[in-house]
């Protein structure tokens, strides 16, 4: 994986995880409003619950990344292991950034 492909994947992972959390929380807030529940509380709660699913969606929802990590460890390809860990970290960063924004919108800690 060259640097251009890696940086493209890292940016995509960030925004996929970010979008899953923002979209899921906003749509969940609308759903909460429709069933007479407090929408801001529901948005805040969903942001915490959807965090891991944003990361899973960003890395592809499969075990390919984990298989690549295992292969990298077993074959001694430390560079590939670091790249995949950084891709997962970029997805986690996107999910966390979205959670901070949802907390900011709902004014919850």
Image (spheres, rainbow, N blue to C red):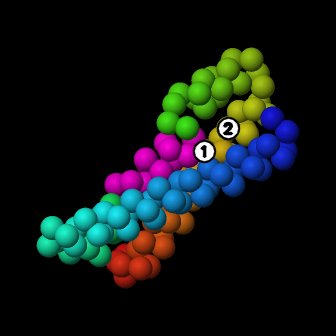
Between residue 40 and residue 33, name the one nearer to us. Answer: 33
Residue most extreme to the bottom: 107
Magenta stretch, main secondary structure class? helix
Q: Position of residue 28 (x, y in %)?
A: 31, 63
Q: Residue 51 lies in magenta, yes or no?
A: yes
Frontmost residue, 74 versus 26 = 26
- According to the image, label 2 marks what residue? 84
Q: Quadrant of residue 106?
A: bottom left
Magenta stretch, residue numbers: 47-59
- Asked if residue 11 is among those painted magenta in the image, a careful observer would answer no
Tell me residue 36's x, y (percent).
14, 73
The structure residue drawn at horizontal position 71% and vertical position 33%, both measured from the top left corner, is 81
Extreme residue toward the front, this view: 34
Kindly indicate whether the residue at mark 2 contacts the one at mark 1 (C-beta within 8 angstroms): yes
Q: Is residue 31 above or below residue 63?
A: below
Query: Is 101 on the left or on the right of 74, as rendered?
Result: left
Q: Is residue 98 left or right of residue 27?
A: right
The residue carrying mark 1 is 88
């Amino acid at each position: 994986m060259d640097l251009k492909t890696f940086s493209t994947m890292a940016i995509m992972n960030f925004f996929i995880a970010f979008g899953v959390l923002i979209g899921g929380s906003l749509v969940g807030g609308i759903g909460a409003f429709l069933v007479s529940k407090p929408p801001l509380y529901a948005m805040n709660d969903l942001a915490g619950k959807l965090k891991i699913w944003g990361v899973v969606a960003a890395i592809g929802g499969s075990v390919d990344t984990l298989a690549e990590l295992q292969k990298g460890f077993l074959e001694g390809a430390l560079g590939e292991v670091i790249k995949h860990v950084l891709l997962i970290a970029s997805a986690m960063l996107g999910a966390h950034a979205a959670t901070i924004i949802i907390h900011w919108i709902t004014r919850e800690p």
